[in-house]
């Protein structure tokens, strides 16, 4: 494993001054006689998503290394983002006084784009996420900045893994965790942490049918390029970086990956507001959708990670009206 439990524990200490230990609560709506479904509510974090954990850990660690090598040289950062990582890294960069360029898909939710710009980052739009990732990596390769991947970066993954440490403390008898999958950074970190404590905990990933590179790659036995379609879960769409470290980690720590469609996502988004009084974005609703669609076998204590809440108000109104 490129990331260890020690890396995740160190990340927790490094980011504890700015990152919340988020609440976990039972969902009577989703629970069954055989299973207690627990909601891990990452939507209350600064920047309204779990991404602050990995972004801040990566930025702080880079600053520590740079200060040790060349105290006068503040690193310039560059990243690609579907929105939440860019917002989180912009928040971290502003906190640490680091310049940041964010390449982002032009069709990202307005609430995410505006938040990145408001945090002071240099925002550059691209036709889609895959193009944004290519442009950001090329900019870094030209020697103009340090690229921090939103998912394929050891410190980003270690930061995400701190959720796993909290789950172990908050639900010691946890049997399974359901995690949305985009680039695989979240489920990699959480899976490493949980399996280190108890290998019997089932780690279940959820992809959307519109973009399922892990499902296709696992079936093919290698990374494959997919035809990405639009989705309510905008944070989960896009191809995998050819150099990603997450594919191998997911193979190691994830027991199962299931798919959900757009109709299930809509039901989940509306249901979270009506039944749980929680606002979540499409990516965060993926785990809930999997449970609603009986895609996941439920028994014992099952945690669902609600990864973020950055969704345009107009989209929420549209979903509730439908």
Image (cartoon, rainbow, N blue to C red):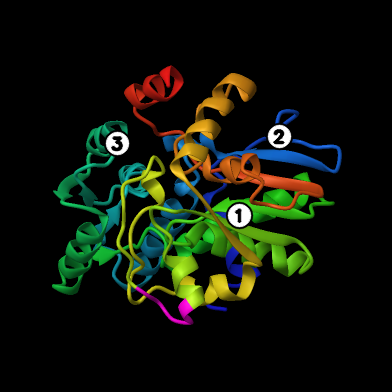
Tag 3 and tag 1, C-beta contact below 8 Å: no
Question: Residue at position x 80%, y 47% from top?
Answer: 301
Q: Which mark is residue 109?
A: 3
Marks counted in the figure total 3
Residue at 60%, 40% in the rendered image: 288
Residue 53 visible in image: yes
Give the main secondary structure of the magenta stretch: loop
The residue to which callout 1 is attached is: 162
Residue 222 magenta-drawn?
A: yes
Q: Quadrant of residue 241?
A: bottom left
The residue that appears at 76% across and 49% down in the rendered structure is 298
Residue pushed farthest bottom?
Answer: 221
Residue shown at the point (51%, 27%) measured from the top left:
279
**Residue 314 horizontal side relative to residue 302, left or right:** left
Q: CA distance from mark 3 to mark 1?
A: 27 Å
Q: Quadrant of the C terminus?
A: top left
| Of pointers 1 and 2, the one earlier in the residue sequence | 2
Select label 1 or label 2 by which is in front: 2
* Res 30 label: 2
Q: Is residue 10 above or below residue 92?
A: below
Residue contact at pointers 2 and 3, CB within 8 angstroms: no
Work out which quarter of the rendered image holds the N terminus and state it: bottom right
Q: Helix, strand, or loop for circle 1?
A: helix
The mark that comes first in sequence, 3 or 1, is 3
Q: How far apart are labels 1 and 2 at the CA level?
A: 25 Å
Q: Of the residues tagged 2 and 3, which is closer to the observer?
A: 2
- Tell me if residue 11 can be seen: no
| Residue neighbourhood size for the residue with mark 3, other residues' Cα within 10 Å, grouped as few (<14), some (14–19), many (≥20) | some
Q: Position of residue 184 (x, y in %)?
A: 48, 62
Q: Which residues are magenta?
A: 220-224
């Amino acid at each position: 494993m490129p990331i260890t439990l020690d890396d995740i524990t160190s990340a927790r200490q490094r980011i504890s001054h700015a990152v919340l230990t988020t609440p976990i609560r039972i969902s009577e709506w989703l629970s069954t006689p055989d299973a207690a479904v627990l909601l891990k509510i990452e939507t209350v974090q600064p920047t309204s998503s779990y991404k602050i954990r990995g972004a801040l850990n990566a930025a702080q660690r880079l600053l520590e290394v740079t200060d040790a090598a060349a105290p006068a040289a503040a690193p310039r950062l560059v990243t690609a983002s579907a929105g939440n990582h860019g917002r989180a890294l912009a928040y971290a960069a502003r906190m640490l006084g680091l310049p940041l360029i964010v390449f982002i898909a032009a069709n990202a939710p307005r609430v995410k784009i505006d938040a990145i710009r408001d945090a002071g980052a240099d925002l550059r739009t691209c036709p889609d996420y895959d193009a944004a990732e290519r442009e950001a990596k090329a900019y870094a390769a030209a020697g103009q900045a340090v690229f921090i991947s939103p998912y394929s970066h050891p410190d980003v993954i270690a930061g995400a893994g701190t959720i796993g440490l909290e789950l172990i403390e908050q639900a010691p008898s946890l049997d399974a965790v359901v995690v949305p999958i985009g680039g695989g950074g979240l489920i990699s970190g959480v899976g490493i942490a949980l399996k280190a404590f108890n290998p019997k905990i089932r780690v279940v990933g959820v992809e959307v049918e519109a973009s399922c590179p892990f499902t296709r790659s696992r079936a093919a036995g290698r990374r494959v390029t997919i035809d990405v379609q639009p989705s309510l879960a905008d944070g989960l769409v896009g191809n995998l970086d050819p150099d990603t470290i997450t594919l191998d980690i997911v193979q190691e720590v994830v027991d199962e990956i299931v798919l959900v469609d757009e109709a299930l996502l809509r039901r989940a988004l509306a249901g979270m507001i009506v039944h749980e009084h929680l606002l979540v974005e499409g990516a965060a609703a993926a785990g809930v959708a999997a449970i609603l669609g009986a895609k996941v076998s439920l028994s014992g204590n099952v945690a669902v990670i609600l990864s973020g809440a950055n969704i345009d108000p107009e989209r929420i109104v549209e979903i509730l009206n439908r």
